[in-house]
Image (cartoon, grey):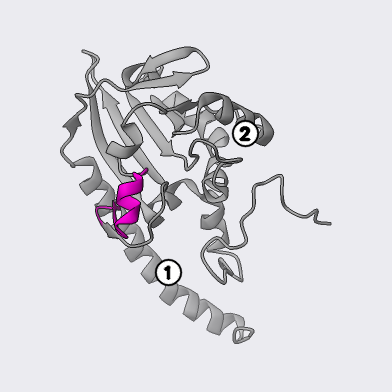
Amino acid sequence: MQNAVVSREAWLSARLDLLKAEKELTRRRDEVARQRLALPWVRIDKDYTFDTPDGPRKLADLFDDRSQLLVQHFMFAPGWKQGCRSCSFMADHTDGMNRHLVHHDVTMIAVSRAPLEEIERFRRRMGWQFPWVSSNGSSFNYDFRVSFTPEEIASGRVDYNFGEWQMTGEEWPGVSAFFKDEAGDVFHTYSTYGRGVEVIMGTYAMLDIAPKGRNEAEGMDWVRHHDRYEPVA
């Protein structure tokens, strides 16, 4: 179904009405950002260890001499043949962002429960360069409520996105932020889940201004691993 076709003058009038709504949204987004920056922090007291290509590293080591760390909780459990396609869609945006983030005191990485060798095999297939580490053997994913035990799944509800989630599964996506002070202490400052992870998905921001919008029958039904799309002309 095609939208109404009108004169340039009528289009401009409608566009100005939309501009008011867009400016209200921008102001509201700025206010939410201020509230996010004002959130209290939680000191990380657990001694998490991650498996990395450079050997075992603590959470504080993953900052790479920067004070801020962003973590994509990438859905990739032990034994999976490949990482989640939606998380892969998110990760396709990371290398481009990292070229800028590292110059603004921010390190961005991915963390999954899959063993490092499985992560590295998939990362090579996808051609990604960003750091991706394994939390296998630690409680990191469980503590940040992106991985769930068989007992939790069997209950029919899991504690995800700060509430009960009836769509059970062993892995769910998220993004978390951490700060490291000069003494080396690490603090959890923010996490977002569910549709909050769209913060990484710049492609969606562009689709939102395209004529057909997201054009989805069901959320992300069209997304594939980038090496699994059919060729296009």
Q: Where in the figure is residue 18, as x and y percent of width and height?
A: 43, 73
Label of residue 46 in the image: none
Check the image and report above or below for 165 versus 227.
below
Magenta residues span: 146-163
Q: Where in the figure is residue 46, as x and y percent of width and height?
A: 23, 24
Point out the residue furthest to the left here. Answer: 40
The answer to if 147 sits in the magenta stretch is yes
Check the image and report above or below for 168 versus 72.
below
Q: Residues within 10 Å of mark 1 (few under 14, many from 20)?
A: few
Q: Secondary structure at mark 2?
A: helix
Q: Amino acid at mark 2?
A: Phe
Residue occupying the point 31% across, 31% down: 139
Q: Name the residue tied to disc 1.
A: 19
User: Is 145 on the left-hand or right-hand side of 56?
Assistant: left
User: Is 116 on the left-hand or right-hand side of 73?
Assistant: right
Q: Name the residue tied to disc 2.
A: 122
